[in-house]
Image: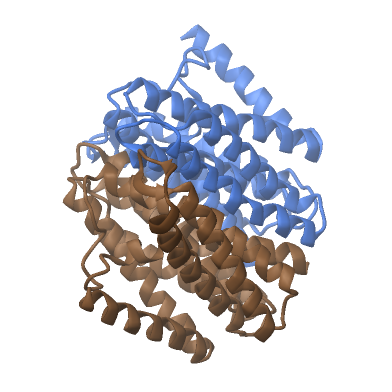
Chain colours: A brown, B blue
C-alpha cells in the first residue's frame, strides 16, 4: 500500500509535469509513453504464445505517432506527405511476415496492427488535445487527466461504499453500477471546478467532457479487463510498482481520448 | 476454361465501365466491391473457425470507404468531421465484443480490424486515384487496372515460357523470378503505350507506376497466397466462375494502390 501511494504520487507529478513543460516535452513524453504501452501490449501477447511482429510494430508505432504529432509543427503539405507514408510503412507488417515461418501469419499481422490501433491511435488523439486550437495549450490535456483520475477515484470509493449491483460481472467482477454513477458524478464535479480555472470552455462543456470520460472510460476499463482475461493474466505489467502495468493505468484514456477529441472538434468547428 | 474466358471478358468490361461512367458510378461501384471483398475476407475466416465481428466490421467498412470517398464531394470541414467519426464507429468493434461470450475476444477484434486494413484501406486509395487532381478523372484508375492486368498476364506467360528459378516457393510454388521480370517488363510496355493516350503524366512517370505495380503487386499476390495457406484454402471464394473469389482477383491491387497513390501525391505536390 505504501509502495502504491509513493508510485501514485510520482506518477501524478510526472504526468502533470509532462503537460506543463511546453509542447516539445509534451510531444516527446507521450511518444515515449506510447511506445512503452505498445511494447507492453506486444510483450503480453508473446507471453500468451502469440507472435506479433515486435520490431516492425514498434517502428510503425513510432512513425505513426510522430507523423500525426508533426501536424502541429510542420507545414500542411509536409504533414500530408508524412501521414501518407504511413500507408507504406504499415505495408511492411505484411511484407515482413512473408519472410517469417509462422503457422498463423495472419494472426500475427492482425495482432501487430491491433497494438497500433489499441495504443498508438488513442495516444495520438490525446496528444492532439494539447493542440486543439492550433498552438499548444496544456489545459485540455490536464483537464482530461484530472477528470479521468476523479472518475477512477470516485468510482472506487462509491463502489466500496454503496456498491451492490454488478455492472458487467463477466469482464470485471468488482465493478458496480453504483460505482459507475459515483465515478461520473465525481468527474462532473471535477469538471465544474476545472471550469473555474480553465476558461477555454463553458462549465457545461467541461462537465460534458467529464461525463464522456466517465462513460467511455469505463468501457475502456472493461475492454482492458477483457483483454487481460482473454490472455489469462492479472496485471498488464510491472513497470509501476504497486500499480501493475502502464496499460492498466491508461485503460480509461484509450477509448475516451478519441471521443473527447471528437467532441471538442465538433463544438469548435 | 471457357467459363474462365467468359467471366474474364465480362469482368474486364464491368471494371472499365465502372471507371468510364463518371464519378458517382465510380464511387458507388467501388463501395460495393469493397464491401463484397470485406465480406469474402470475413467469411473465409469464419470457415476457419475464427470469429470476426461481421456486422460491425461491414458497417465500419461501409462508413470508412464512404467518409474517405466524400472528401471529394463535400466541404473540407464536413469531410474532417466525417473522417473523425471513424474513431467513434470503430470503437464499436471493441464495445460490441464486450457483449459476446467468446473465448478469444481480442483475436476476433484483431481480425475484424485486419479486414478493414486489408480491403477497405486499399480500395479507398484506389478510389482516390480517380480524384488525384481534385475533380474526377478516370485515366489514373484505368491506367492502373490496365497495367495491373498487363503485369498479371505478362508474368503468367513469361513464367510458363522461361520460368525456372522459384520466387518464393513457400508461399506461391508456381511463381518464378523469370515470370516476375517478364510481368514487370510487360507492365512497363503497357505503361509506355498508355502514356501515348493519357497525357496527364510523362511516359517516365507512367512507366514508373507500371514498375511499382509489378513489384508491389507481386508482394500483394504473395501476401494473399500466405493468407490462403494460413487458412488452408485454395480459392478465396466462388463469386467469379472459373476465377475463384474477388480477393484472388484484386490481390495485386491491395498493396499496390496505396503505394501508387503515394507516388502520384509526391510527384504532384
Q: Check the image and name the residue furthest to the top.
A: B2
Q: Is residue B92 left or right of residue A118?
A: right
Residue A179 screen position, x and y as percent: 46, 54
The residue depicted at 32 percent of the width and 67 percent of the height is A246
Q: Is residue B119 above or below residue A135?
A: above
Q: Is residue A79 visible?
A: yes
Residue B8 screen position, x and y as percent: 56, 19
Q: Is residue A123 left or right of residue B262?
A: left
Q: Is residue A89 visible?
A: no
Q: How many marks?
A: 0
Quarter of the image for residue A206 reads: bottom right
Residue B116 screen position, x and y as percent: 51, 41
The residue depicted at 65 percent of the width and 41 percent of the height is B63
**Relative depth, front residue between B151 and A257:** A257
Q: Is residue B111 left or right of residue A195?
A: left
Quarter of the image for residue B234 reads: top left
**Relative depth, front residue between A1 and B230:** A1
Q: Check the image and name the residue furthest to the bottom.
A: A21
Q: Quadrant of the C terminus of chain A?
A: bottom right
Q: Is residue B177 above or below residue B29?
A: below
Q: Is residue B184 left or right of residue A232?
A: right
Q: Quadrant of the N terminus of chain A?
A: bottom left
Q: Check the image and name the residue furthest to the front.
A: A161
The residue depicted at 38 percent of the width and 27 percent of the height is B45
Residue B241 screen position, x and y as percent: 51, 12
Quarter of the image for residue A200 reads: bottom right
**Relative depth, front residue between B201 and A267:** A267
Amino acid at each position: 500500500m505504501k509502495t502504491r501511494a509513493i508510485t501514485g504520487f510520482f506518477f501524478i507529478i510526472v504526468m502533470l509535469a509532462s503537460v506543463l513543460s511546453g509542447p516539445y516535452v509534451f510531444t516527446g513524453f507521450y511518444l515515449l509513453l506510447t511506445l512503452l504501452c505498445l511494447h507492453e501490449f506486444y510483450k503480453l501477447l508473446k507471453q500468451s504464445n502469440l507472435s506479433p511482429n515486435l520490431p516492425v510494430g514498434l517502428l510503425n508505432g513510432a512513425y505513426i505517432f510522430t507523423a500525426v504529432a508533426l501536424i502541429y509543427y510542420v507545414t500542411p503539405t509536409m504533414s500530408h506527405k508524412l501521414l501518407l507514408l504511413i500507408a507504406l510503412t504499415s505495408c511492411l507488417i505484411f511484407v515482413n511476415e512473408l519472410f517469417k515461418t509462422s503457422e498463423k501469419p495472419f494472426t500475427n499481422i492482425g495482432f501487430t496492427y491491433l497494438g497500433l490501433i489499441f495504443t498508438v491511435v488513442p495516444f495520438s488523439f490525446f496528444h492532439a488535445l494539447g493542440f486543439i486550437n492550433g498552438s499548444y495549450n496544456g489545459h485540455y490535456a490536464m483537464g482530461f487527466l484530472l477528470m479521468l483520475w476523479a472518475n477512477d477515484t470516485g468510482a472506487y470509493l462509491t463502489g466500496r461504499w454503496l456498491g451492490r449491483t454488478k455492472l458487467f460481472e463477466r469482464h470485471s467482477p468488482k465493478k458496480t453500477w453504483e460505482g459507475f454513477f459515483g465515478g461520473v458524478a465525481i468527474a462532473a464535479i471535477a469538471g465544474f471546478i476545472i471550469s473555474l480555472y480553465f476558461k477555454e470552455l463553458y462549465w457545461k462543456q467541461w462537465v460534458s467532457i467529464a461525463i464522456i470520460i466517465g462513460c467511455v472510460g469505463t468501457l475502456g476499463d472493461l475492454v482492458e479487463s477483457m483483454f487481460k482475461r482473454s490472455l489469462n493474466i492479472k496485471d498488464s505489467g510491472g513497470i509501476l510498482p504497486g500499480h501493475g502495468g502502464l496499460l492498466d493505468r491508461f485503460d480509461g484514456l484509450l477509448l475516451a481520448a478519441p471521443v473527447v477529441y471528437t467532441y471538442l472538434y465538433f463544438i469548435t468547428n
